[in-house]
Amino acid sequence: MCGIVAYVGQQDALPIILKGLKRLEYRGYDSAGVALLDQRGLSIYKKKGKVAELENHLAENGEIHAKVGIGHTRWATHGEPNTANAHPHLSQSGDIALIHNGIIENYATLKKVLVQRGHTFKSDTDTEVLIHLIEEIKINEKVDLLEAVRLALNEVIGAYAIVLLSKNDPNTLIAARKGSPLVVGISDTKGEFFLASDATPIVEYTKTVTYIDDNEIVSIHDGEMTIKTIDNVHKSAYMQQLEISLD
Ligand code: GLU
């Protein structure tokens, strides 16, 4: 099991994400990475090994002050545990980053088609195939990112919790799940949201959460959260109050 943490709001995303990834270390992992979006664009940092090694790598890159970002600890299923296979993975253009927990079972078939269409891959993962597919659909169908994610997930067989961050969609996180857990924390501060594989990275910031159900896609855009199914049916979020504390 790997770990997912994402943040959008007015605070510095990176320390929140790194702290959250550490809280998920108990789940086990072999590599870690983050994608951050600021005025300089979309940056990816990843490293084989522990979150502490990722932190050292980040420290070599100077100050980073992004208000939105995604972070991942990987438990390799497709491709060996190394830095190239660590998440986040990028789309063909490099404009969209994806973290993924789970397995895309039909990735080999999808990859073959994408390679025929000129896509090149930098990793051996099933995850990279999914982000290339999403961008391919976005361009071909001339749809927005949320719709491209929905259409792509209809072509996917497997299990996933995913979160996307796109250079061209600031203040936006798109996430979905099927078979792998995903929780959204809704802060009292307007426009601030936390996503994670379980509530432990969230509980110190907010106790209000919604657990995403299988086949649901959540979009957080300009401070508003919407949920729909992969069949395009809108859902209202079922809010719960966490009864756990950090201790
Ligand atoms: N299947 C993906 C990979 O091998 C995700 C693994 C995970 O859940 O960490 O990169």
Image (spheres, rainbow, N blue to C red):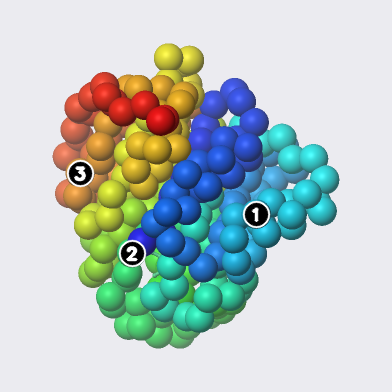
> On the image, which quarter does residue 69 sit in?
top right
- Mark 1 or 2, closer to the camera: 1
Look at mark 2 in the image and give the residue it sits on: 102
Q: Is residue 186 above or below residue 163?
A: above
Looking at the picture, tell me which residue is in the foreground, 193 or 115.
193
**For this view, does 157 lie left or right of residue 9?**
left
- What residue is shown at x 35% (from left), y 77% (from top)? 107
Look at mark 1 in the image and give the residue it sits on: 52
Earlier along the polypeptide chain: callout 1 or callout 3?
A: 1
Ligand 1: does it lie within 8 Å of the C-beta at label 3? no
Are discs 1 and 3 less than 8 Å apart at CB? no
**For this view, does 121 lie left or right of residue 202?**
right
**Residue 20 place in picture, x, y as percent:** 50, 41
Looking at the picture, tell me which residue is in the foreground, 8 or 242.
242
- What residue is shown at x 46% (from left), y 26% (from top)? 204
Are discs 1 and 2 less than 8 Å apart at CB? no
Q: Quadrant of the N terminus?
A: bottom left
User: Residues under labels 1 and 3: Cα distance?
Assistant: 32 Å
